Amino acid sequence: MTEIDRRPASAEEFHGMHSGPELLILANVWDAVSARALVSLGAKAVATSSAAVAWLHGYPDGNALPVPLLLGSLRDIARNVKVPMTADIEGGYSDDPNTVGETVTSLIDVGVVGINLEDGTGSPDLLCAKIHAVRESAARAAVRLFVNARTDVFLKKNICGPDTLAEAIARGNRYAATGADGIFAPGITNADAIETLAREVPRPLNVRPGPGCHLLANSCGSGRVA
């Protein structure tokens, strides 16, 4: 059985990992060696770090990595591990939703079954359009791609003060309604805020541990932690 033949089953497996009851812990990789090391330690899936993959090739983080280099790294990882792979693709490396959709088709072709797609400092309308295009690409490939919509309102601090959580909830619900399977909110560290976001947005919640972040299983619900 080829890697391409395995894509639908691997995608379903990855979706199942988000249904709980245990938290899904995803550590980031950047090449085949780091991916194999994690799998040898028992990782159930691997996730790529967009920054690490970009730096590996001599490019800065921030949608600067040429897509062919990204695909090469992902192809190497897929060839060396047999667990589901999800890729952080920043903003899709384009502001054109159709181009993002085409990129995702190429990602699926090399074995990716999940993506992180972020709004950054851009409009949530734009991310919704990208999610829609990605959904169409995945449907054509007959792969149930896990689309993890990342909102950067906490990380980028483009919405400040008490409105930050409300904005994250509003964006999360918009992205979910457009077709996102999960919500990623890096930069959120308060357990009460994590619990509120998990409760108010009906999708698995992905958070990133860091200084000041005290994670509780009942705060994250059925979400994944990476």
Image (tube, rainbow, N blue to C red):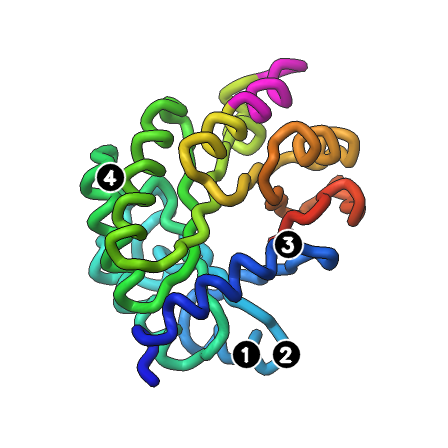
Of labels 3 and 4, earlier in sequence is 3
Of labels 2 and 3, earlier in sequence is 3
The structure residue drawn at horizontal position 41% and vertical position 26%, both measured from the top left corner, is 121
As measured in the structure, the alpha-carbon distance from the residue carrying label 2 to the one carrying label 3 is 22 Å
Relative image position of residue 39 (x, y in whole percent): 56, 77
Please name whichever residue, 120 or 97, is drawn nearer the observer in this view of the structure.
97
The correct choice, above or below, for 103 with respect to 196 in the image is below
As measured in the structure, the alpha-carbon distance from the residue carrying label 2 to the one carrying label 1 is 7 Å
Query: Residue 37: which disc?
Result: 1
The correct choice, above or below, for 181 with respect to 174 in the image is below
- Residue of label 2: 41
- Residue of label 4: 94
- Region of the chain picked out in magenta, as a range: 160-170
- Give, as a three-letter code, the residue at label 4: Ser
Of labels 1 and 4, earlier in sequence is 1
Tag 3–tag 1 contact (CB < 8 Å): no
- Give, as a three-letter code, the residue at label 2: Leu
The structure residue drawn at horizontal position 48% and vertical position 65%, both measured from the top left corner, is 29
- Residue of label 3: 19
Tag 3–tag 4 contact (CB < 8 Å): no
The structure residue drawn at horizontal position 66% and vertical position 28%, both measured from the top left corner, is 200
Tag 2–tag 1 contact (CB < 8 Å): yes
Disc 1 crowd rating (10 Å Cα; few below 14, some 14-19, many 20+) is few
The correct choice, above or below, for 16 with respect to 91 in the image is below
Nearer the observer: mark 3 or 4; the answer is: 3
Disc 4 crowd rating (10 Å Cα; few below 14, some 14-19, many 20+) is some
Q: Quarter holding the C terminus? A: bottom right
Please name whichever residue, 108 or 178, is drawn nearer the observer in this view of the structure.
178
